[in-house]
Image (tube, rainbow, N blue to C red):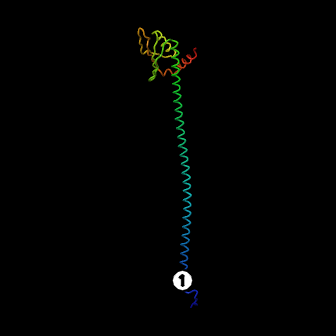
Amino acid sequence: MRPFNLLNHPGLAQQRRVFHRCWSSLAGIFTGCLLAWLGLQWQTAEILQLRQVESQLQSAWLARSQETQDATRQQTRQRIESEQVGHLQKIEQHQQAWMAVHERLQELAEGQGFRLSRLSSETGQLTLHGEASRFEVMAAAQQSLSDQWGQSVTLKNVTTGPASPVSFVWQTDWPVLHSAPLAAAAVSGKAKP
């Protein structure tokens, strides 16, 4: 038979086993909770870091989008300004051509002895209304103008009376007046004293 040991009593051994099981279970639960808490903290830190990266990427994307929109607006503004400059240059050329025609006609009227009462331009046609003392003066001025401009100046209407001056209406193509003959006529008209 075995010697009787109170320190190794079967009831005490079972009590130790229960205590060991409880302690092991509590230690396992504590370790599991600690690991779960650490995992949760790590996951929270990762989520915060990912949100920060997402925020940086989103702000970079917004900055690039803004730069792209600004560049597009700038290009559109430059294109519109370029078109406006081109349009203003065309207007200026048209105005210079109109002034050259007007000046040349005034010089011609003074030199040839007729008077212009109205000058208009519609749908590519230049129409001149005027009066001359005699029909021959009007015909000579019409021929002189046709020769200087290098295009036909047609007589559309003429009114004569026994004691009144000859009223006439001339017509010619306006677009042709923008060409070299007009410029040459304007320059030659300015060069003459």
Residue type at the position of mark 1: Gln
State the residue at coordinates (54%, 83%). 15
Nearer the observer, 26 or 176: 176
- Residue 143: where, in percent of width, then height? 48, 12
Identify the residue under disc 1: 15
Task: Indicate the quadrant where residue 129 lies.
Answer: top left
- Residue 110: where, in percent of width, then height? 52, 13
Vertical relation: 14 (above or below) 37: below
Nearer the observer, 112 or 50: 112
State the residue at coordinates (48%, 14%). 115
State the residue at coordinates (54%, 18%). 186
Quarter of the figure with the N terminus: bottom right
- Residue 158: where, in percent of width, then height? 42, 13
Nearer the observer, 68 or 119: 119
Nearer the observer, 138 or 132: 132
Quarter of the figure with the C terminus: top right
Label 1: how many residues lie within 10 Å, few (<14), some (14-19) or many (20+)?
A: few
Task: Indicate the quadrant where residue 167 lies.
Answer: top left
- Element assignment for label 1: helix
- Residue 119: where, in percent of width, then height? 47, 19
